[in-house]
Image: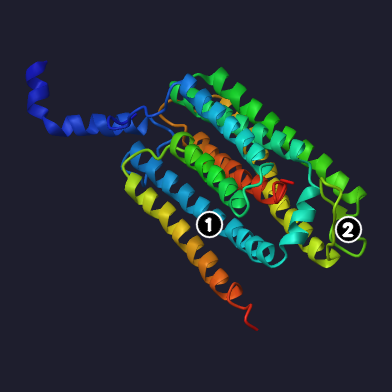
Protein backbone atom coordinates (compact mmCIF):
# COMPACT_ATOMS: atom_id res chain seq x y z
CA UNK A 1 0.00 0.00 0.00
CA UNK A 2 2.72 2.39 1.04
CA UNK A 3 4.84 1.36 -1.94
CA UNK A 4 2.16 1.89 -4.53
CA UNK A 5 1.49 5.41 -3.23
CA UNK A 6 5.18 6.19 -3.41
CA UNK A 7 5.35 5.10 -7.06
CA UNK A 8 2.41 7.22 -8.20
CA UNK A 9 4.09 10.08 -6.38
CA UNK A 10 3.28 13.80 -6.60
CA UNK A 11 0.55 13.49 -9.26
CA UNK A 12 -1.81 11.72 -6.86
CA UNK A 13 -1.19 14.30 -4.15
CA UNK A 14 -2.03 17.12 -6.52
CA UNK A 15 -5.27 15.53 -7.68
CA UNK A 16 -6.29 15.03 -4.05
CA UNK A 17 -5.66 18.70 -3.28
CA UNK A 18 -7.74 19.84 -6.25
CA UNK A 19 -10.58 17.54 -5.29
CA UNK A 20 -10.43 18.83 -1.74
CA UNK A 21 -10.63 22.44 -2.89
CA UNK A 22 -13.45 21.67 -5.27
CA UNK A 23 -15.43 20.70 -2.18
CA UNK A 24 -15.56 24.32 -1.00
CA UNK A 25 -18.67 25.57 -2.85
CA UNK A 26 -17.91 29.20 -2.01
CA UNK A 27 -14.56 29.23 -3.84
CA UNK A 28 -14.92 30.55 -7.39
CA UNK A 29 -12.83 28.98 -10.16
CA UNK A 30 -10.84 32.07 -11.10
CA UNK A 31 -9.26 32.36 -7.65
CA UNK A 32 -6.20 30.36 -6.61
CA UNK A 33 -7.50 29.75 -3.09
CA UNK A 34 -10.03 30.96 -0.54
CA UNK A 35 -7.61 33.46 0.95
CA UNK A 36 -7.00 35.14 -2.42
CA UNK A 37 -10.73 35.32 -3.05
CA UNK A 38 -11.29 36.89 0.37
CA UNK A 39 -8.48 39.44 -0.15
CA UNK A 40 -9.91 40.46 -3.53
CA UNK A 41 -13.42 40.93 -2.08
CA UNK A 42 -12.05 42.90 0.85
CA UNK A 43 -9.95 45.18 -1.37
CA UNK A 44 -12.97 45.82 -3.61
CA UNK A 45 -15.03 46.72 -0.55
CA UNK A 46 -12.40 49.19 0.65
CA UNK A 47 -12.30 50.78 -2.82
CA UNK A 48 -16.07 51.22 -2.60
CA UNK A 49 -15.73 52.74 0.89
CA UNK A 50 -13.20 55.24 -0.49
CA UNK A 51 -15.74 56.35 -3.13
CA UNK A 52 -18.24 56.77 -0.29
CA UNK A 53 -15.76 58.92 1.64
CA UNK A 54 -15.33 61.11 -1.47
CA UNK A 55 -19.11 61.28 -1.96
CA UNK A 56 -19.79 62.46 1.59
CA UNK A 57 -16.56 64.50 1.45
CA UNK A 58 -18.11 66.76 -1.18
CA UNK A 59 -21.00 67.55 1.16
CA UNK A 60 -18.66 68.06 4.12
CA UNK A 61 -16.65 70.49 1.97
CA UNK A 62 -19.80 72.44 1.01
CA UNK A 63 -20.78 72.50 4.69
CA UNK A 64 -17.35 73.87 5.66
CA UNK A 65 -17.41 76.64 3.04
CA UNK A 66 -20.92 77.85 3.98
CA UNK A 67 -20.34 77.51 7.72
CA UNK A 68 -17.27 79.75 7.45
CA UNK A 69 -19.26 82.25 5.36
CA UNK A 70 -22.47 82.30 7.47
CA UNK A 71 -21.44 81.21 10.95
CA UNK A 72 -24.23 83.02 12.88
CA UNK A 73 -26.99 81.45 10.76
CA UNK A 74 -25.40 78.03 11.12
CA UNK A 75 -25.19 78.46 14.90
CA UNK A 76 -28.85 79.57 15.07
CA UNK A 77 -29.93 76.67 12.86
CA UNK A 78 -27.97 74.23 14.98
CA UNK A 79 -29.75 75.48 18.16
CA UNK A 80 -32.99 74.22 16.60
CA UNK A 81 -31.76 70.60 16.60
CA UNK A 82 -32.27 68.34 19.60
CA UNK A 83 -28.96 67.33 21.20
CA UNK A 84 -30.78 64.65 23.23
CA UNK A 85 -32.11 62.92 20.10
CA UNK A 86 -28.84 63.38 18.19
CA UNK A 87 -26.75 61.98 21.05
CA UNK A 88 -29.17 59.07 21.51
CA UNK A 89 -28.82 58.25 17.82
CA UNK A 90 -25.03 58.42 18.10
CA UNK A 91 -25.19 55.93 20.98
CA UNK A 92 -27.59 53.66 19.02
CA UNK A 93 -25.17 53.58 16.07
CA UNK A 94 -22.14 52.90 18.28
CA UNK A 95 -23.95 49.99 19.96
CA UNK A 96 -24.96 48.68 16.51
CA UNK A 97 -21.31 48.78 15.43
CA UNK A 98 -20.46 46.64 18.47
CA UNK A 99 -23.18 44.11 17.55
CA UNK A 100 -21.74 44.04 14.00
CA UNK A 101 -18.22 43.11 15.19
CA UNK A 102 -19.75 40.51 17.50
CA UNK A 103 -21.67 39.12 14.49
CA UNK A 104 -18.42 38.84 12.50
CA UNK A 105 -16.80 37.14 15.51
CA UNK A 106 -19.71 34.66 15.75
CA UNK A 107 -19.39 33.94 12.00
CA UNK A 108 -15.66 33.31 12.42
CA UNK A 109 -16.41 30.87 15.24
CA UNK A 110 -19.16 29.19 13.20
CA UNK A 111 -21.91 29.93 15.76
CA UNK A 112 -24.92 30.18 13.47
CA UNK A 113 -27.61 31.10 16.02
CA UNK A 114 -25.43 33.74 17.70
CA UNK A 115 -24.59 35.18 14.27
CA UNK A 116 -28.27 35.43 13.26
CA UNK A 117 -29.16 37.05 16.62
CA UNK A 118 -26.50 39.74 16.28
CA UNK A 119 -27.51 40.45 12.68
CA UNK A 120 -31.16 40.82 13.71
CA UNK A 121 -30.22 43.07 16.67
CA UNK A 122 -28.15 45.21 14.28
CA UNK A 123 -31.15 45.65 11.96
CA UNK A 124 -33.37 46.56 14.93
CA UNK A 125 -30.84 49.16 16.13
CA UNK A 126 -30.63 50.56 12.60
CA UNK A 127 -34.42 50.87 12.52
CA UNK A 128 -34.39 52.53 15.96
CA UNK A 129 -32.01 55.11 14.52
CA UNK A 130 -34.32 55.72 11.54
CA UNK A 131 -37.43 56.06 13.74
CA UNK A 132 -35.69 58.66 15.95
CA UNK A 133 -34.51 60.44 12.80
CA UNK A 134 -38.11 60.37 11.54
CA UNK A 135 -39.35 62.13 14.69
CA UNK A 136 -36.66 64.78 14.22
CA UNK A 137 -37.72 65.29 10.60
CA UNK A 138 -41.38 65.58 11.63
CA UNK A 139 -40.49 68.37 14.05
CA UNK A 140 -38.63 70.17 11.23
CA UNK A 141 -41.72 69.99 9.01
CA UNK A 142 -43.94 71.30 11.82
CA UNK A 143 -41.61 74.25 12.47
CA UNK A 144 -41.35 75.04 8.73
CA UNK A 145 -37.61 74.43 8.88
CA UNK A 146 -37.66 72.38 5.68
CA UNK A 147 -36.05 74.37 2.83
CA UNK A 148 -38.51 75.44 0.17
CA UNK A 149 -41.32 77.97 -0.39
CA UNK A 150 -42.77 77.41 3.11
CA UNK A 151 -39.45 77.86 4.92
CA UNK A 152 -39.66 80.24 7.89
CA UNK A 153 -36.92 81.23 10.27
CA UNK A 154 -37.47 84.04 12.75
CA UNK A 155 -34.81 85.58 14.97
CA UNK A 156 -33.79 83.24 17.72
CA UNK A 157 -32.66 83.79 21.27
CA UNK A 158 -29.62 82.33 22.91
CA UNK A 159 -29.60 80.97 26.46
CA UNK A 160 -29.20 84.46 27.98
CA UNK A 161 -32.30 85.75 26.19
CA UNK A 162 -30.16 87.85 23.85
CA UNK A 163 -31.63 88.11 20.38
CA UNK A 164 -29.44 86.88 17.52
CA UNK A 165 -30.40 88.46 14.19
CA UNK A 166 -30.35 85.78 11.52
CA UNK A 167 -30.76 86.00 7.78
CA UNK A 168 -33.48 83.45 6.93
CA UNK A 169 -31.86 82.67 3.55
CA UNK A 170 -28.62 81.76 5.30
CA UNK A 171 -30.47 79.62 7.85
CA UNK A 172 -32.20 77.88 4.95
CA UNK A 173 -28.75 76.99 3.64
CA UNK A 174 -27.94 75.31 6.95
CA UNK A 175 -31.15 73.27 6.82
CA UNK A 176 -30.54 72.36 3.16
CA UNK A 177 -27.18 70.91 4.15
CA UNK A 178 -28.73 69.29 7.24
CA UNK A 179 -31.33 67.48 5.12
CA UNK A 180 -28.88 66.60 2.35
CA UNK A 181 -26.31 65.13 4.72
CA UNK A 182 -28.60 63.39 7.23
CA UNK A 183 -30.91 62.31 4.38
CA UNK A 184 -28.06 60.69 2.46
CA UNK A 185 -26.87 59.11 5.70
CA UNK A 186 -30.39 57.82 6.41
CA UNK A 187 -30.56 56.35 2.88
CA UNK A 188 -27.33 54.48 3.64
CA UNK A 189 -28.89 53.25 6.89
CA UNK A 190 -31.97 51.97 5.02
CA UNK A 191 -29.71 50.13 2.54
CA UNK A 192 -27.69 48.78 5.47
CA UNK A 193 -30.83 47.47 7.20
CA UNK A 194 -31.88 45.72 3.97
CA UNK A 195 -28.39 44.27 3.55
CA UNK A 196 -28.26 42.92 7.09
CA UNK A 197 -31.80 41.51 6.88
CA UNK A 198 -30.73 39.57 3.77
CA UNK A 199 -27.57 38.37 5.51
CA UNK A 200 -29.62 37.25 8.53
CA UNK A 201 -31.83 35.08 6.26
CA UNK A 202 -28.81 33.57 4.46
CA UNK A 203 -27.00 33.00 7.78
CA UNK A 204 -30.10 31.27 9.14
CA UNK A 205 -30.04 28.97 6.09
CA UNK A 206 -26.44 28.10 6.97
CA UNK A 207 -24.76 29.82 4.02
CA UNK A 208 -21.77 30.97 6.07
CA UNK A 209 -19.07 28.91 7.75
CA UNK A 210 -15.76 29.67 9.50
CA UNK A 211 -14.18 29.07 6.05
CA UNK A 212 -16.45 31.54 4.25
CA UNK A 213 -18.12 34.57 5.79
CA UNK A 214 -16.76 37.36 3.54
CA UNK A 215 -20.22 38.94 2.93
CA UNK A 216 -20.69 39.36 6.71
CA UNK A 217 -17.28 41.02 7.02
CA UNK A 218 -17.78 43.34 4.04
CA UNK A 219 -21.31 44.36 5.07
CA UNK A 220 -19.79 45.05 8.50
CA UNK A 221 -17.21 47.37 6.90
CA UNK A 222 -20.05 49.26 5.21
CA UNK A 223 -21.98 49.56 8.48
CA UNK A 224 -18.92 50.89 10.32
CA UNK A 225 -18.30 53.50 7.61
CA UNK A 226 -21.91 54.72 7.89
CA UNK A 227 -21.35 54.88 11.67
CA UNK A 228 -18.15 56.94 11.18
CA UNK A 229 -19.98 59.41 8.90
CA UNK A 230 -22.57 59.95 11.65
CA UNK A 231 -19.77 60.39 14.22
CA UNK A 232 -18.72 63.45 12.19
CA UNK A 233 -22.25 64.63 11.32
CA UNK A 234 -23.35 64.77 14.98
CA UNK A 235 -20.90 67.42 16.28
CA UNK A 236 -20.87 69.35 12.98
CA UNK A 237 -24.65 69.72 12.76
CA UNK A 238 -25.91 69.54 16.36
CA UNK A 239 -23.15 71.15 18.40
CA UNK A 240 -22.38 74.48 16.71
CA UNK A 241 -21.78 77.24 19.26
CA UNK A 242 -23.81 75.66 22.07
CA UNK A 243 -21.98 77.37 24.93
CA UNK A 244 -23.34 80.59 26.39
CA UNK B 1 -9.65 27.21 5.47
CA UNK B 2 -6.20 28.00 4.09
CA UNK B 3 -3.32 27.68 6.50
CA UNK B 4 -2.07 31.29 6.56
CA UNK B 5 -5.49 32.59 7.57
CA UNK B 6 -5.35 33.58 11.20
CA UNK B 7 -8.05 34.44 13.68
CA UNK B 8 -7.50 38.17 14.22
CA UNK B 9 -10.72 39.07 16.01
CA UNK B 10 -10.47 40.21 19.61
CA UNK B 11 -12.40 38.96 22.63
CA UNK B 12 -15.99 39.98 23.27
CA UNK B 13 -14.93 41.96 26.34
CA UNK B 14 -12.45 43.93 24.24
CA UNK B 15 -15.17 44.96 21.76
CA UNK B 16 -17.51 45.96 24.59
CA UNK B 17 -14.71 48.05 26.12
CA UNK B 18 -14.10 49.87 22.80
CA UNK B 19 -17.87 50.43 22.51
CA UNK B 20 -17.97 51.85 26.05
CA UNK B 21 -15.02 54.11 25.19
CA UNK B 22 -16.89 55.40 22.12
CA UNK B 23 -19.97 56.14 24.25
CA UNK B 24 -17.84 58.01 26.82
CA UNK B 25 -16.26 60.06 24.01
CA UNK B 26 -19.77 60.90 22.72
CA UNK B 27 -20.71 62.19 26.18
CA UNK B 28 -17.42 64.13 26.29
CA UNK B 29 -18.09 65.82 22.95
CA UNK B 30 -21.58 66.90 24.13
CA UNK B 31 -20.15 68.20 27.41
CA UNK B 32 -17.31 70.04 25.68
CA UNK B 33 -19.79 71.81 23.39
CA UNK B 34 -21.31 73.61 26.40
CA UNK B 35 -17.96 74.94 27.63
CA UNK B 36 -16.80 78.16 26.00
CA UNK B 37 -13.42 77.38 24.51
CA UNK B 38 -13.56 80.12 21.91
CA UNK B 39 -12.15 79.03 18.56
CA UNK B 40 -11.19 75.67 20.05
CA UNK B 41 -14.79 74.38 20.34
CA UNK B 42 -15.02 73.05 16.76
CA UNK B 43 -11.40 71.87 16.91
CA UNK B 44 -12.07 69.83 20.08
CA UNK B 45 -15.30 68.45 18.55
CA UNK B 46 -13.50 67.34 15.37
CA UNK B 47 -10.57 65.96 17.37
CA UNK B 48 -12.90 63.78 19.47
CA UNK B 49 -14.78 62.68 16.31
CA UNK B 50 -11.46 61.73 14.70
CA UNK B 51 -10.40 59.74 17.79
CA UNK B 52 -13.74 57.89 17.64
CA UNK B 53 -13.41 57.23 13.90
CA UNK B 54 -9.85 55.96 14.42
CA UNK B 55 -11.01 53.57 17.15
CA UNK B 56 -13.71 52.21 14.81
CA UNK B 57 -11.28 51.77 11.87
CA UNK B 58 -8.52 50.18 13.95
CA UNK B 59 -10.54 47.83 16.14
CA UNK B 60 -13.84 47.21 14.33
CA UNK B 61 -12.80 47.27 10.67
CA UNK B 62 -10.12 44.59 10.53
CA UNK B 63 -7.79 44.75 7.59
CA UNK B 64 -7.01 41.07 7.25
CA UNK B 65 -5.06 38.95 4.82
CA UNK B 66 -2.13 39.38 2.49
CA UNK B 67 -3.20 42.65 0.84
CA UNK B 68 -3.09 44.60 4.10
CA UNK B 69 -0.64 47.20 2.73
CA UNK B 70 -2.57 47.56 -0.52
CA UNK B 71 -5.81 48.17 1.41
CA UNK B 72 -3.97 50.74 3.53
CA UNK B 73 -2.73 52.47 0.37
CA UNK B 74 -6.30 52.59 -1.02
CA UNK B 75 -7.59 54.13 2.22
CA UNK B 76 -4.77 56.68 2.44
CA UNK B 77 -5.29 57.67 -1.22
CA UNK B 78 -8.97 58.33 -0.40
CA UNK B 79 -8.07 60.70 2.44
CA UNK B 80 -5.37 62.27 0.26
CA UNK B 81 -7.88 63.25 -2.42
CA UNK B 82 -10.36 64.41 0.23
CA UNK B 83 -7.59 66.66 1.62
CA UNK B 84 -7.00 68.08 -1.89
CA UNK B 85 -10.74 68.73 -2.30
CA UNK B 86 -11.05 70.57 1.01
CA UNK B 87 -7.73 72.44 0.99
CA UNK B 88 -8.05 73.75 -2.58
CA UNK B 89 -11.71 74.75 -2.03
CA UNK B 90 -10.81 76.65 1.14
CA UNK B 91 -7.74 78.18 -0.54
CA UNK B 92 -10.26 79.74 -2.93
CA UNK B 93 -13.14 80.70 -0.62
CA UNK B 94 -11.05 81.91 2.32
CA UNK B 95 -9.05 84.31 0.15
CA UNK B 96 -12.01 86.17 -1.36
CA UNK B 97 -12.45 88.66 1.49
CA UNK B 98 -10.27 91.32 -0.16
CA UNK B 99 -12.89 91.95 -2.83
User: Circle 1 sits on which residue?
Assistant: A51
Marker disc for residue A155: 2
Q: Is residue A42 visible?
A: yes
Q: Is residue A159 left or right of residue A194?
A: right
Marker disc for residue A39: none
Q: Residue at position x 87%, y 45% from top? A: A139
Task: Report in which chain the residue with disc 2 lies.
Answer: A
Report which quarter residue A144 is drawn in.
bottom right
Q: Residue at position x 79%, y 46% from top? A: A81
**Residue furthest out toward the top:** A1
Report if the CB atoms under discs 1 and 2 are less than 8 Å apart. no
Q: Residue at position x 44%, y 21% from top? A: B11
Report which quarter residue B76 is drawn in.
bottom left
Q: Residues within 10 Å of mark 2 (few under 14, many from 20)?
A: few
Q: Is residue B27 left or right of residue A45?
A: right
Q: Nearer the viewer, residue B43 or A187?
A: B43
Q: Is residue A28 above or below residue A54?
A: above
Quarter containing the N terminus of chain A: top left
Q: Return the x and y of residue A196 as percentages of the image width and height.
A: 62, 35
Q: Return the x and y of residue A80 as percentages of the image width and height.
A: 82, 48
Q: Nearer the viewer, residue A117 or A234?
A: A234
C-alpha distance separating marks 1 and 2: 39 Å
Q: Is residue A133 above or below residue A47?
A: above
Q: Are marks 1 and 2 on the same chain?
A: yes
Q: Residue at position x 25%, y 31% from top? A: A17
Secondary structure at numbered mark 2: loop
Amino acid sequence: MHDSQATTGPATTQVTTLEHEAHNPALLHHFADAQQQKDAASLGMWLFLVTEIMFFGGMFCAYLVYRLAHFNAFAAGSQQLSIALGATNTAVLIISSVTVVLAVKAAEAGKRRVLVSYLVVTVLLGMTFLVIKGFEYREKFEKHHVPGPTFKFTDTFDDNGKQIPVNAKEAELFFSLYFAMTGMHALHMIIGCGLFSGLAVLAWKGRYSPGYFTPIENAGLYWHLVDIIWIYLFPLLYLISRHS
Amino acid sequence: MSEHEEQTSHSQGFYLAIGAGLLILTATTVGAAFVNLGPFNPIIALLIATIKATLVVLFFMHVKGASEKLTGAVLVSGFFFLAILISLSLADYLTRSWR
